[in-house]
């Protein structure tokens, strides 16, 4: 998978690709990265990339021309320019990080991790001239119902959630029991020391009894999800995601809290 990030501040993204597990994945050639500075495609001497919106209103907008030239430099087709339109087969997916996009979820992260190349377009100011979205963008993605000042932070969230799902980056076992993987949040975890102040690690985790540990973890997952994210339980039930054991524990906990 190669991530290509278009930004007015690519240095914000560059550092991320050099560190920790992602840095190792880049060094091992599992993940590729290139950044494109949109300002390099501004033609005036001030390298202007923003202007006031037509019709008035607060703030500035990113201008279509520099962004369009940056995208064209990557060989991406403009849907409205017959000279540049090419086959969609093998075309990298162009994503614009935007608060008006579809919500980014773990499911979406899994889907995107299967792509060969992602082109991530980061907005600034009040966002992009709509014509760029119409001409080049395949999908707008929001990382949550709040407004950030820049798309770079949102792009980092998307990169961080997807690269770790790419085969050979992280051992599959680490991903299997994570939050959301089974429709439930993850169980509480502990490491050394056994006693932290007056707080002890739960006895069952020291027992070495695998079946008891599994049952305790499942019970805790369900308790936590019911308390913090009952919407996930409802979704899991509707999708028929839970086995009989999970359904029984959910019913017991609901009866307990109703009684
Ligand atoms: N005027 C825009 C609106 O009201 O929808 C907000 C623009 S925001 C200040 C600037 C840039 O930050 C956007 O172009 C986008 O790239 C990024 N951004 C802000 N919030 C985001 C979110 N929740 N998810 C993804 N990107 C976001």
Image (cartoon, rainbow, N blue to C red):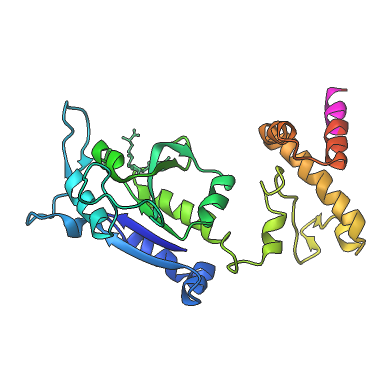
Residue drawn at 17 percent across, 47 percent down: 65
Residue drawn at 66 percent across, 32 percent down: 231
Left or right of 245: which side holds 78?
left
Left or right of 219: which side holds 176?
left
Dominant SS in magenta:
helix
Residue 18 drawn at (x, y percent):
43, 71
Residue drawn at 82 percent across, 58 percent down: 201
Quadrant of image for the C terminus? top right
Quadrant in the rendering for residue 43 = bottom left
The extreme top residue here reads 259
Quadrant in the rendering for residue 166 = bottom right
Residue 70 drawn at (x, y percent):
23, 56
Quadrant in the rendering for residue 142 = top left
Residue 134 drawn at (x, y percent):
29, 38
Residue 43 seen by the camera = yes
Q: Quadrant of ligand 1?
A: top left
Residue drawn at 48 percent across, 74 percent down: 29
- Height in image: 12 above or below 227? below
- Height in image: 239 above or below 189? above
Left or right of 230: which side holds 87?
left
Numbered range of the magenta stretch: 253-258
Residue 131 highlighted magenta (yes or no): no
Residue 157 drawn at (x, y percent):
47, 52
- Height in image: 53 above or below 121? above
Q: Give the total of numbered labels.
A: 0
The extreme bottom residue here reads 28
Nearer to the camera, 13 or 6? 6
């Amino acid at each position: 998978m190669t991530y290509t990030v278009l930004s007015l501040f690519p240095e914000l993204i560059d550092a991320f690709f050099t560190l920790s597990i992602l840095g190792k994945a880049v060094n091992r050639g599992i993940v590729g990265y290139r950044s494109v500075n949109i300002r390099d495609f501004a033609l005036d001497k001030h390298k202007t990339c923003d202007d006031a919106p037509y019709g008035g209103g607060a703030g500035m907008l990113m201008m279509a021309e520099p962004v369009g030239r940056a995208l064209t430099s990557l060989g991406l087709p403009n849907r409205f320019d017959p000279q540049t339109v090419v086959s969609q087969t093998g075309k990298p997916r162009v994503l614009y990080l935007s608060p008006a996009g579809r919500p980014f979820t773990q499911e979406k992260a899994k889907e995107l991790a299967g792509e060969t190349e992602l082109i991530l377009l980061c907005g600034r100011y009040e966002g992009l001239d709509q014509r760029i979205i119409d001409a080049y963008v395949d999908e707008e993605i929001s990382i949550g119902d709040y407004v950030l000042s820049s798309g770079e932070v949102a792009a980092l969230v998307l990169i961080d959630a997807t690269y770790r799902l790419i085969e050979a980056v992280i051992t599959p076992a680490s991903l299997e029991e994570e939050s959301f993987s089974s429709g439930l949040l993850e169980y509480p975890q502990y490491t050394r020391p056994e006693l932290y102040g007056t707080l002890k690690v739960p006895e069952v985790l020291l027992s070495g009894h695998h079946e008891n540990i599994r049952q305790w973890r499942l019970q805790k997952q369900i308790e936590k999800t019911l308390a913090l994210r009952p919407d996930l339980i409802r979704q899991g039930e509707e999708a028929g995601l839970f086995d009989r054991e999970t359904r029984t524990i959910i019913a017991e906990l609901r009866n307990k809290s109703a009684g």
